[in-house]
Image: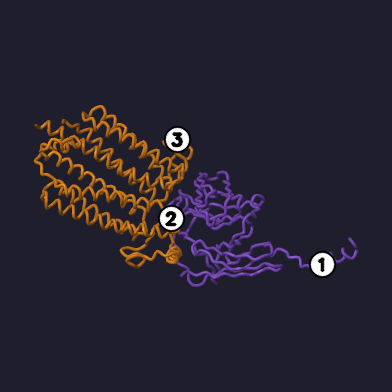
Chain colours: A purple, B orange
Amino acid sequence: MKFSSIFLLIAALAATPVLHAADITGVIIFKGTPPAEKEITPLMDNADCAAMYKTTPTTHFYVVGPKGEFADVVVSLKGVTGKSTGASAPPAVMDQKGCMYSPTILAVQTGQKIIVKNSDTCIHNVHTKPTVDGNQEFNDVQMPGGADLTYTFPKPEMFLKFQCDVHPWMFAWVSVFDSPYFAVSDKDGKFTIKNVPPGKYTLEANHRKLGAQTQDVEVADKDVTVNFTFEVK
Amino acid sequence: MKTNPWLFRFAVLTAFATFLLIGLGGLVTSNNAGMSVPDWPTSYGYNMFALPIKFWKGGAFFEHTHRLLASAVGFLTTILAVWLWLKDSRQWMKWLGVIAFLLVIAQGILGGLRVTMKMNSLGIFHGAVAQTFFVLVCAIALFTSRAWNELAARKIIFIPRGLRSHVLFVTILIFIQLLIGATMRHQHAGLAIPDFPSAYGKFWPDTSAVAVAGYNAHRMEINGENPITAFQIILQMVHRLVAFLILAGVAAAAWLARKRLGGKDSLTKLAIFWLALILTQVALGAATIWTNKAADVATAHVMVGALSLVTGALWCIIGFGRSASALPDAQAFGVFGVQTSMMANK
């Protein structure tokens, strides 16, 4: 190859824009007034659990801030599969504390470990209720102070339910994705999906009660902002 | 035939224990506690009969006591079957005892498999077998009673075939209704329709996808939080319609019995008792909705449902037995041993 050809090749490569991964951020807003949460009165009838509360705790299906900041919405890139790094990702942790799951909304990758703790002084059973073939239903006893339990799920599934049948008000919902491109909105309604490769995607925001909304998004070399608004009709 | 009052009393005890067991099973489902003890036949790794009291809490209290009472009913049924085999002279009664024994064993295994295999559908089947077993044990109690064995000696009023068929049809309808109810309960979705007598404010609710999504958005269930589906809404509507058919059918049975048999006849009284049960059951069904499926109310609904089924079944047995004994045609004899009594009285 002549020197001039090499020079031209280098020049061409230098002129080609190199696209880097970027973040998708946004805020989820709840519009209007959410339905009133219910007091979990059976919890207060249970001596083990009631001892941990001064007032009756409520359900928290709609976690909405003063300005409509909407937490616990699961945001993900729809249709992105086969990209899971779950096997090497740090485990997600879910605790049972005060006879409630914490957090109640969690998102993980396929193959990623979910560690379930029991910080309570009473017995719990961890009962998973998948609806997708390939994800196993588990039902394990966890004694107070007992060893942590570890679960993994190989198939993507939205809102896979964890429940305790000893305390039937105890629920958590774990969404499983086949990629690392997802996030759960925080108490400020904010979410960030990190290091998204350049390309065109459909971004899906999913609330367990209100279902899914989608928006098309194109990621280039700059961070992208996408907001969603939910309301109860 | 000479009856053994102690055998009768023991059969009644077994039937009563079974009734309580159905109630306790109802509490297990009403409290979504069926899976609270994940292992079987052990409980939390302990021998079932040696589980420390400290673990009898929350959902585990209902599930564990259900297992213990089920064991007691199994034990009572075993004694009853052996007693019938050794002491009852009627061959078919010996085999009825064997069937009861096999059914209670199968029911126990079914309950265990529902836990270990984690299958809700087995729970529905478990509930249906429980109702069938209750009818069987009550029938055994009836057949061991003095009243049954003196049936042929009494002044017989023939039961019209139409009335017998009518009661049989309504009894079958009640069993179907119990299956629908069991299916609804084992969906673990709370109330599919939260109001009564209207349904989402209408005569017939909107079951479109948009409407169902709206219902789910507003639902705030504490227990059994699964989203409801259009199927579950329609199932509850069918349950309501069948309830109306049963109420009309039982009211017609009471009216027909009074007209054909007279107000003093025992079957007329039984039919009126049946009507009272059904009216109670309708009230409990409404209360189940108005109390947002309170566990005690929903369980009472299950128990009165079981009593309604048994009452209809016993009415049919007595009705068919009496009719058989009232017929002059010897070929009609032989129904549930009435022939034996007839022969003895001749």
- The spot of residue A25 in percent (x, y) is 64, 67
Q: Secondary structure at mark 1?
A: helix
Circle 3 or circle 2, nearest the eye: 2
Is residue B300 in view? no
Q: Residue A121 in the image: state x and y as whole percent.
A: 51, 48
Alpha-carbon distance for marks 3 and 1? 77 Å
Amino acid identity at mark 3: Asn
Point out residue A47 in the picture as x, y percentages from the top left corner. Answer: 44, 50
Image height of B323 relative to B245, above or below: above
Badge 1 is on which residue? A12
**Residue B223 shows which numbered tag?**
2
Q: Nearer the viewer, residue B322 or A171?
A: B322
In which image quadrant can residue B297 be found?
Answer: bottom left
Circle 2 marks a residue in which chain?
A: B
Q: Please say if B67 is above or below A192.
A: above
Q: B345 or A161: nearer the eye?
A: B345
Q: Chain of mark 1?
A: A
Residue A59 is left or right of residue B2, and the answer is right
Q: Nearer the viewer, mark 3 or mark 1?
A: 1
Q: Which residue is mark 3?
A: B47
